[in-house]
Image (cartoon, rainbow, N blue to C red):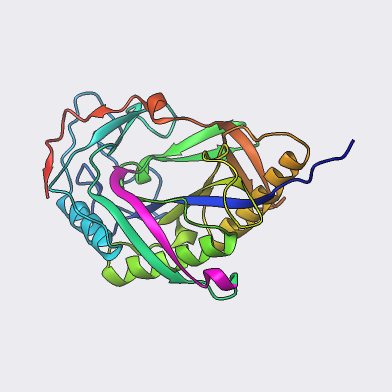
């Protein structure tokens, strides 16, 4: 029996970038926004540690810097915006929910054009759409002690202002993803919205990737995208490039063996150079979004 050849597969990549905004205080309280070298749990209050009855108060400077970043990315700034509760439980999220934005973000429908030196000839200059950019608060930081098998929590980072920037799935290679992030970092620094230092955790990237079969004319062989894999918390340009390259090879091997990847969230191990499964992929329904009752809508 003649074996049919496997179609060519191309990567479909979209990025979610969490950027720490350059404010003096946190998103919803007056605690200082301190760096990693501050003593643990030295910049906390009832609001950012989720104490019962503590109410948030919005940081106006975070809104201004978020809008400024959105304008630099060619986004439209809507007339109104509001905050939502994103519900999930984790040790570093004391309230049991995160104050974020869901259906009414502060920035929508932008784009960036970048040059990709060393990329494929037909994609030396590409346009990458920006789906949205929205404000949210950061979680605390877990410190895992492997010896005693305990987890400590430093709440200094809890409540620091973040801008999450979500791209369209317009990226086609690990090199393009790295180049986009380098250009984004330069833009954010230039307009003063963020220092965007990846090594300090001020810019973190989640990369989503799936493989799409195409024909000899580079046209898709199907209308829907295959299940996507999200690689969480990549904290360097090199890690983004290496993790995507590994994941593209891993998914390609599965398809070659007539297997289909299951939509999931994976971590990246810098030492082994491999991704590893963390959990199955959540959807927006899993987070049970609803409007934040303690913050009024924004008039932008």
Q: What residue is drawn where x is 35% and y is 30%?
A: 94
Nearer to me, 190 or 28: 190
Residue at the outermost bottom position? 117
Q: What residue is drawn where x is 80% and y is 42%?
A: 4
- Position above or below: 190 against 227: below
Where does residue 81 sit, x and y in percent of width and height? 17, 42
Membership of 244 in magenta stretch: no
Q: Is residue 238 visible from the viewing direction of this image?
A: no
Nearer to me, 269 or 256: 256
Where does residue 155 sit, x and y in percent of width and height? 37, 40
Q: What residue is drawn where x is 78% and y is 38%?
A: 257
Membership of 125 in magenta stretch: yes
Q: Quadrant of residue 279?
A: top right
- Position above or below: 63 against 141: below
Where does residue 121 sit, x and y in percent of width and height? 58, 73
Residue at the outermost left position? 299
Nearer to me, 241 or 47: 241
With 255 as the anchor, is 180 left or right in this view? Answer: left
Q: Count the marks.
A: 0
**Magenta stretch: dominant SS?**
strand
With 69 as the anchor, is 226 left or right in this view? Answer: right
Q: Is residue 274 visible from the viewing direction of this image?
A: yes
Q: Quadrant of residue 156?
A: top left
Q: Quadrant of residue 230?
A: top right
Figure quadrant of the N terminus: top right
- Position above or below: 144 against 35: above
Residue at the outermost right position? 1
With 219 as the anchor, is 100 left or right in this view? Answer: left
Magenta stretch?
121-137
Q: What residue is drawn where x is 58% and y is 70%?
A: 119
Where does residue 234 sit, x and y in percent of width and height? 53, 52
């Amino acid at each position: 029996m003649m074996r049919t050849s496997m179609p060519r597969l191309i990567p479909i990549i979209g990025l979610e970038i969490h950027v720490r905004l350059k404010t003096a205080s946190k998103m919803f309280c007056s605690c200082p926004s301190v760096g990693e070298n501050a003593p643990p749990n030295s910049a906390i209050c009832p609001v950012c540690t989720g104490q019962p009855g503590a109410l948030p108060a919005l940081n106006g400077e975070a809104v201004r810097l978020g809008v400024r970043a959105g304008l630099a990315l060619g986004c439209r700034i809507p007339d109104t915006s509001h905050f939502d509760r994103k519900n999930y439980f984790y040790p570093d999220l004391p309230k049991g929910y995160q104050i974020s934005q869901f259906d009414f973000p502060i920035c929508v429908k932008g784009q960036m054009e970048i040059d990709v030196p060393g990329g494929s000839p037909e994609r030396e200059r590409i346009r990458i759409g920006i789906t949205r950019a929205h404000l949210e608060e950061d979680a605390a930081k877990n410190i895992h002690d492997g010896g005693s098998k305990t987890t400590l929590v430093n709440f200094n980072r809890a409540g620091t202002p973040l801008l999450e920037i979500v791209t369209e799935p317009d990226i086609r290679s690990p090199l393009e993803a790295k180049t986009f992030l380098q250009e984004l970092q330069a833009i954010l620094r230039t307009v003063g919205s963020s220092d965007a230092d990846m090594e300090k955790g001020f810019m973190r990237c989640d990369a989503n990737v799936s493989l799409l079969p195409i024909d000899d004319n580079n046209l898709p062989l199907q209308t829907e995208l295959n299940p996507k894999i999200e690689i969480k918390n990549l904290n360097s340009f090199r890690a983004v490039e290496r993790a995507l390259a590994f994941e593209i090879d891993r998914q390609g091997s599965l398809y070659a063996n007539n297997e289909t990847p299951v939509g999931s969230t994976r971590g990246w191990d810098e030492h082994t150079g491999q991704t590893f499964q963390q959990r199955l992929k959540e959807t927006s329904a899993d987070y049970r979004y609803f409007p934040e009752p303690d913050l009024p809508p924004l008039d932008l």
